[in-house]
Image (cartoon, rainbow, N blue to C red):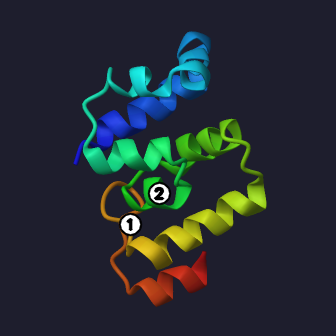
Amino acid sequence: MSLYQLQKVLFDINRNPGIYEQFVNDFDALLAQYDLTDEEKEALVKRDIGLVYVLGANCQLLMHFAAACGVGWSDYLQKMRDGVRNHGPVRAGFYAMTTSVDEKVAGL
């Protein structure tokens, strides 16, 4: 997994107006600039906030990406819960889950 690269693309979209413009106009070309797994690319292209969360993306970065995708705050929180339900526990990063999925989802 290329968690650093996943988080880097989120950071760049959030912070760099030129990258944001490329996100809006040619997302596939933008993603080609990063060393992402196929699963990471697919999650980003589909704007699957829940899967990006499960892959380990930092929630601060992901929150801004979700907003750029037109996802409101309460929907963002629900998409993270749904991601855990649909894709299993967070796999990597700061939010990696060490308890059961049911325990974690109840706490979100």
Figure quadrant of residue 15 = top right
**Other residues around mark 1 within 10 Å, as few (<14) / some (14–19) / many (≥20):** many
Whether 19 is drawn above or below 59: the answer is above
- Residue 79 is situated, as x and y percent measured from the top left of the image, at 61, 64
The numbered mark at residue 90 is 1
Residue nearest the viewer, comparing 32 with 68: 32
- Secondary structure of the residue carrying tag 2 is helix
- Numbered circles on residues, count: 2
- Residue 18 located left or right of residue 68: left
Going by the numbered disc 2, the residue's amino acid type is Tyr
- Residue at left offset 52%, top offset 54%: 48
Whether 13 is drawn above or below 71: the answer is above
Q: Which residue is mark 2?
A: 53
Q: Are marks 2 and 1 in contact (CB under 8 Å)?
A: yes
- Residue 7 is situated, as x and y percent measured from the top left of the image, at 41, 38
First reached walking from the N terminus: tag 2 or tag 1:
2
- Secondary structure of the residue carrying tag 1 is loop
- Residue at left offset 31%, top offset 64%: 91
Whether 34 is drawn above or below 93: the answer is above
Spatial separation of the CA atoms under disc 2 and disc 1: 7 Å
Figure quadrant of residue 30 = top left
